[in-house]
Image (tube, rainbow, N blue to C red):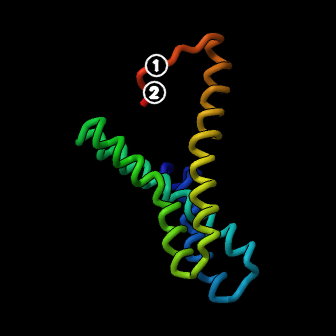
Amino acid sequence: MKKILKPGIHYLFIFIPISIILEKMEASAPMIFFSAALSIIPIAHLIGSSTEQLASYTGDAVGGLLNATFGNLPELIIAVVALKAGLHGMVLASLAGAILANLLLAMGVSFLVGGTKFHNQDYNVTSIRV
């Protein structure tokens, strides 16, 4: 019973109906945006957990492919909705932001965190060339 009351990421699911209600009430765009952004967090967590569970059954190669595919699901959803609305510039900005976040931010944070623990870091040259 205590596990149910434990604070966690799943409490953010409440923002899904809040986002819908805010949109129906024609609230301000920033309020709807931040509510929707908070509602995506537990969904992304479930997608990540699901792909990890599938990877344990399918192996590393298929698991990595599933993780890469479903890990970018929010960008795909944004792109489809924006294209239906005719917002081509938003699609380009979303894709550019996703690429920059994955290449620069994630790699930079990895280097920074790795550098705090290991003064000299070794990398697999073959993997880097791929």
Q: Name the residue under label 1.
A: 125
Q: Are marks 2 and 1 in contact (CB under 8 Å)?
A: yes
Nearer the observer, 97 or 8: 97
Up the image or down, 47 lies above or below 60; here it is: below
Numbered label tally: 2
SS label for mark 1: helix
Percent of width and height locating residue 55: 30, 42
Furthest toward the front, the residue is 129
- x 59%, y 34%: residue: 107
Where on the picture, by quarter, is residue 87?
A: bottom right
Q: Which residue is drawn at 53% across and 14% down?
A: 122
Instruction: Please name whichever residue, 70 or 122, is drawn nearer the observer in this view of the structure.
Output: 122
Name the residue that disc number 2 marks. Answer: 129
Can the viewer see residue 1 in this picture?
A: no
How far from the left and from the top, in percent, is residue 113?
64, 26
Q: Which mark is residue 10?
A: none
Quadrant of res 70: bottom left
Is residue 42 shown above or below 103? below
Name, please, the residue furthest toward the bottom: 25
Name the side, left or right, on which 98 lies relative to 70.
right
Which amino acid is tagged 1? Val
The answer to whether residue 103 shows anywhere in this view is yes
Which quarter of the picture shows residue 115?
Answer: top right
Crowding at mark 1 (Cα within 10 Å: few <14, some 14-19, many 20+): few
Q: Position of residue 80 (x, y in %)?
A: 49, 72
Q: Is mark 2 on a helix, strand or loop?
A: helix
Q: How far apart are marks 2 and 1 (CA)?
A: 6 Å
In the picture shown, does residue 117 fall above or below 28?
A: above
Amino acid under disc 2:
Arg
Residue at image position (68%, 89%) is: 25
Q: Position of residue 30 (x, y in %)?
A: 75, 72
User: For mark 2, does the 10 Å Cα neighbourhood hold few (<14), some (14 to 19), or many (20 or more) residues?
Assistant: few
